[in-house]
Amino acid sequence: MFKKILIANRGEIALRVIIACRELGIKTVAVYSEADENSLHVRFADEDVCIGPARSADSYLNVPAIISAAEITGADAIHPGYGFLSESAYLAEVCEACHIRFIGPDPNVIKLMGDKSRARRAMKKAGLPMLPGSDGPIDGEEKALKIAKEIGYPVIVKAVAGGGGRGMRVVRSASELGNALRTAQREAEAAFGNGSVYIEKYLENPRHIEFQILGDHHGNVVHLGERECSIQRRHQKLVEESPSPALTDKVRRKMGSLVVDAARAVQYTNAGTFEFLMDGEGKFYFMEANTRLQVEHPVTEWVTGIDIVKEQIRIAAGERLSFKQSEVTFSGHSIECRINAEDPDTFAPSPGVIHAFSVPGGPGVRVDTFAHAECTVSPYYDSMIAKIIVHGRDRAEAIARMRRTLEMTVVEGIKTSVPLHLRILAEKDFAAGKLSTGFMDRFATAPKGSSVSEKTA
Ligand code: ADP
């Protein structure tokens, strides 16, 4: 087993990895930017190294600085968390060359899945159901028009290197396609340094359902069931839950085993998430695979009792999975709300100093956060300040638990999305499990303050 792990990340996920390491008796190294000197992940790590100025490109994305920090401190593995370098095949390769274990899949698998168009082809070959679309990147308007005509409008233009909902354009008619293509290419070039795009059929109001898998280096692959992440704004998840209210045991078993077979086909190791869209008839279509830990992993941990971060570490150290598929059982219902530092009505970012921070505990509540009173929410990084996760015997209990937790949450000094979450939970459709990626459209013009007390955030 590793003696020391460097965590190439910040915020709640750096803390989450430290928690797993402490429980496993592994020492930790925090890296931090000049803006994060006083952060909890620095305080709780055994050692810490400053890797550069606040700007991510100069610090958390700085591979030479991170590798040097690992070498100076003698870390034998790097956990990348999510975001930043978590899906960087380059970091994984440099780690390999420097004899530092990268806690994630093999660089070749990261590369394959990081090219969403190649991933589509590979996963189709491996037996996953696919939306009709282009077989590879699109290299001209004429070809795009031809493919779009074949599959039928609406279509969606997506960045091959996409992530975080960027570089995507929905196209409803041929006259819009040329423009959409150029905008998506430009956006993708700016965001990912790669302007390649592909086309697939656009589904109206689907559900987003994803499967969590774990694979070891001895050929064992298991799935840990699904998460439903249909509550999104601008293709970014806001609320996630497990199980999905739309899945039966039979469908879970069938989809789970398809995903496990597909993962095996590419010799997938470590943790991964296979994302699907589900249409109104219950049909699934593969969208992409994320080769890292996901923000929403806690809901899966809670219904399965499996600590995904510890499993990632054990797998990277060469251990066998300690359980079989038949030993993975699901209990109760778990929901996560992502609490962002933003105006709940306009969604404008709201960085600043938090003066008071309190989330009630009580049965079935887990809070993953870096926030505390007098901490600073930096404008340089992602706006998520906390994840509130609840578990109940059933979905209704989980919803009631989340509502009372949010109602009693106090964050003073900055605005947060807590009131928005309360509005979501109060919707009849949410209670009825009638979810879709179009769910949030109803809040587009929500009146200020509506039914929720401003006191809570
Ligand atoms: P990213 O990697 O940027 O997160 P994804 O491919 O995972 O992009 O898609 C993110 C979200 O975009 C999905 O959850 C869904 O809401 C929407 N989306 C993507 N592709 C389609 C599609 N073909 N039809 C309808 N919605 C889509």
Image (cartoon, grey):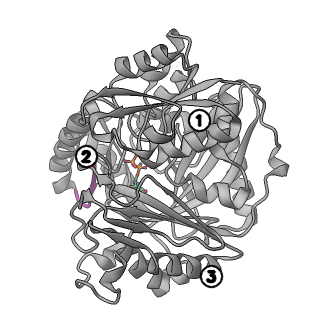
**The quadrant where residue 216 appears:** top right
Under circle 2, the secondary element is: helix
Q: Which part of the image, by quadrant, shows the N terminus?
A: top right
User: Magenta residues?
Assistant: 167-173
Say which mark, if any, is on residue 396.
3
Under circle 1, the secondary element is: helix
Q: Which part of the image, by quadrant, shows the C terminus?
A: bottom left
Q: Residue at x 39, y 81 (%)?
A: 423
Q: Amino acid at mark 3?
A: Ala
Residue topped by disc 2: 145
Say which mark, if any, is on residue 391.
none
Question: In the rendered structure, which disc, 2 or 1, sits on the residue that comes first in sequence?
Answer: 1
Above/below status of 386 relative to 295? below
- Please count the marks in the image: 3
Along the horizontal axis of the image, is 185 left or right of 238? left
**The quadrant where residue 433 appears:** bottom right
**Cα distance between the residues tagged 1 and 3:** 40 Å
Where does the image place residue 198, in percent across and percent down from the top left? Answer: 34, 40
Asked whether mark 3 and ligand 1 are closer than 8 Å, the reply comes as no
Residue topped by disc 1: 125
Q: Amino acid at mark 1?
A: Lys
Question: In the rendered structure, which disc, 3 or 2, sits on the residue that comes first in sequence?
Answer: 2
Camera-side mark, 1 or 3: 3
Camera-side mark, 3 or 2: 3
Under circle 3, the secondary element is: helix
**Cα distance between the residues tagged 3 and 2:** 47 Å
Label 1 near label 2: C-beta < 8 Å? no
Q: Is residue 225 magenta?
A: no
Where does the image place residue 143, in percent across and percent down from the top left? Answer: 27, 38
**Cα distance between the residues tagged 2 and 1:** 25 Å
Q: Residue at x 38, y 36 (%)?
A: 84
Where does the image place residue 411, in percent across and percent down from the top left? Answer: 36, 69
